[in-house]
Amino acid sequence: MIDPLKKLKDKKKLANIDAIGHVTGKSTYVDDIPTMQGTLFIKIFDSPVAHGKIKTVDFSEAEQMPGVVKIFSKKDIPGENQIGGIIQDEPLLADDEVHFRGQAILLIVAESEVEAEEALEKIKIDIEELPAIVDPKEAFLKGQFLSNSRTFQLGDSKKAFESATYIFEGSADSGGQEHLYLETQGAYAYPMEHGSIKIHSSTQGPTQVQKAIARVLGVGMNKVEVDVTRIGGGFGGKEDQANPFAAMTALVAWVLKKPAKCILHRMEDMRMTGKRHPYRSDYKIGLDKNLKIVAYEAAFFQNGGAAADLSPAVLERTLFHATNSYFIPNVVLQAHCCKTNLPPNTAFRGFGGPQGMFVIEAAIDHAARILNVNASDIQQNNLLKDGDEFPYGQIVEDGEAKNSWNELGEKYDIEKIRTSINSYNLPTGQAGNKNTFSKKGMALMPICFGISFTNTMMNHARALVHIYTDGTVGVSTGAIEMGQGVNTKMVQVAAREFGIAPELIKLETTNTTRVANTSPSAASATADLNGKALLDACQQIKNRLIKMIQEVYQLEESAPIIFKNEKITIAKNGKEIPWHQVVTDAFSKRINLSAKGHYATPRINFNKETGKGHPFAYHVYGTALFTATVDCLRGIYEIDEVHIVHDVGETINELVDLGQIEGGLVQGIGWMTMEEIIFNQKGKLLSNALSTYKIPDIYAAPKTINTSFLPLRADNLAIYKSKAVGEPPLMYGIGAYFAIRNAVHAFNPNANFEYVSPITPERVLMALYCK
Ligand code: LUZ
Ligand code: MOS
């Protein structure tokens, strides 16, 4: 078997340390933990209506079913029946009113899952159904909000519109998106001594889980130990929404003093959990005669679902990214967090940013179509440059918007691609037309994404390092491995600092008793924050070892000492001491071989009242070029080619970063094209399984993806000059929407169809033949 650690010695090409485990099925997830004797299984009885008053729930028959141990309602919660994060509006188990289909009402606990399922069928509920709202604009008109509306403002858009040469107004709506992590939500908990509890949870936020459990049980956080080996995907869906399932599991284990397990089935997960927020939005864009955007106004109506969850923070990030990579001097951006009767929508890769970017791209496309110019001419003409001000007050420094655009232009002959598409698309009837029912489209998509939690206080992390006496190393951080490869990057940091092989380093599970008070693994910042904290821990130990060597060999304090190839070399005289020897010597001299590192992102700040500050450590930029072909008889399409120039800073790990870029791209294409979440008017999820909700498979992925890394031009605040890579590439996917749209227009120049995503084959077919 190929050992990736051995084969790929080039450290930038170190394969994901989980790769072999994943493809051989050896990697373990919550449901793979061997169940202890006496383990109880939990099934959730959830609301069958989107809005209603519970009149009676009768579970007397269910309770008598074989194997059933207990049925929990909110009355069985010893602490608070509340798990709201930002706003305290979310009971763990329903109060007298239910607010969405899938809301948990009761927990059925049985000796086996099958028995719990059978008992579930026997529960009788009488609910008085109340009117449900599923549309955010309807909620807005009815005054239904989850939190305060927000406004970001720059310059004077009113005045700017007065002098604008061209003004376009319209609306643009984007759909939700199911996270579809391969591992569904789940947890396994067991009581420990002294009234404490241990839990394995599939979460991006172990501290958030710990806090929720402590609250529900009414105990201190120190009584709750959360342990995560890895999770099978998160994409934001487990930043906050692992909490209820962990809290339910902990509740059962705590009250019944037995191990308890709750793993959602796919359809339960799809029904009960929130998704990417659908948005409806209105825009108004003003340009001067040179195609400079002089003014932009937008109003965003976020479909928040029935409880706030992370919606207010997601809403804010929509505003942060509403002008994408463009400098617009006069801007008013308003956003409304609308309360509807859907499951509480939540974090999803991009965190509101993609929804904001879609609208400005729609506005630009709208202007380009009417002015009969290429959208890319408007895009290029308005790219950010250093010194420009974002609507939130931060000034562009070391911007790469133009660099990535220009680099793309140098690598790929954009005009040649345009010409070949135009000749492929020759109008029907024109000499040379060969493709009557097949048309191509292209689009460029620049991105600009701010890195840091927008809530400044969340931007810090810690790490714990032990060097054992045999020279092997154990590393714990607050980072959650969710497939993104953060553990591989952590191994690389420790290996590089100590100058030892990755094989000598073990990445431990993420555990709240080893690394406390963590921010969730989110906001693309996990490797940045935890990597820096780990660096700090490694350097503390290194400094102790250096001091020891200086004393032993009577060197002056500045004498360079190099950690490399499992040796410590004294540069001056070339003396080499093996790593193991140094470690043994240090231990016998009673030197501390453990350290806790800490990192807090410097400089960042943001004033929520004024909407101004410097919220991001830096920005990630990039540009993508899309070409697509539409089958004009069937409405189906293919993404032919995507060329990307992406700003990774100086990559720590090319393979991991490339995986994130390609994965993010395809997930973004899915959101924009084929993934359609459908709720009916009564708040029932119709796209409730993989037969009715389609995500891109290998056949739907672009036929070609060419990614190149933009050369590093500036230092920045992340680990080893790298840049965060998790979320930004998702937003390239917006380019697929416009490439397909342009192909539709090549077939039907008069197609007057709204900016609604996803642009499913059904929507394409309608547009191809609309007047
Ligand atoms: N989560 C969060 C995020 O709590 N704050 C953020 O700013 C953020 N940004 C992106 C993704 N998750
Ligand atoms: Mo996220 S959307 O970085 O959990």
Image: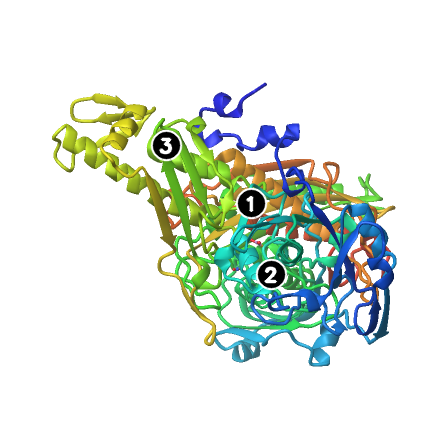
Residue 101 pos. (x, y %): 78, 64
Between label 2 and label 3, give the one nearer the viewer. 3
Residue 19 pos. (x, y %): 58, 31
Q: Which residue is mark 3?
A: 468
Q: Is mark 2 within 8 Å of ligand 1?
A: yes
State whether residue 761 appears in this view. no
Q: Categorize mark 3 by other alpha carbons within 10 Å: few (<14), some (14-19), many (20+).
A: some
Residue type at tag 1: Val
Nearest the eye: 79 or 738: 79
Calculate the distance from the C-alpha at mark 2 to the C-alpha at mark 3: 44 Å
Calculate the distance from the C-alpha at mark 1 to the C-alpha at mark 3: 23 Å
Is residue 563 toward the left or the right of residue 14 in the image? left
The answer to whether mark 2 and mark 3 are in CB contact below 8 A is no
Identified at 44% across, 49% down, the residue is 515
Q: Quadrant of the C terminus?
A: bottom right
Q: Secondary structure at mark 1?
A: strand
Q: Earlier in the sequence, mark 1 or mark 2?
A: 1
Question: For residue 250, which quarter of the picture?
Answer: bottom right
Residue 693 pos. (x, y %): 79, 50
Q: Categorize mark 2 by other alpha carbons within 10 Å: few (<14), some (14-19), many (20+).
A: many
Furthest-top residue in this view: 1
Q: What mark, if any, has residue 352 been given in the picture?
A: 2
Q: Earlier in the sequence, mark 1 or mark 3?
A: 1
Above or below 471: residue 437: below
Q: Which residue is mark 1?
A: 228
Is residue 126 toward the left or the right of residue 708 in the image? right
Ligand 2 resides in the quarter of the picture at bottom right
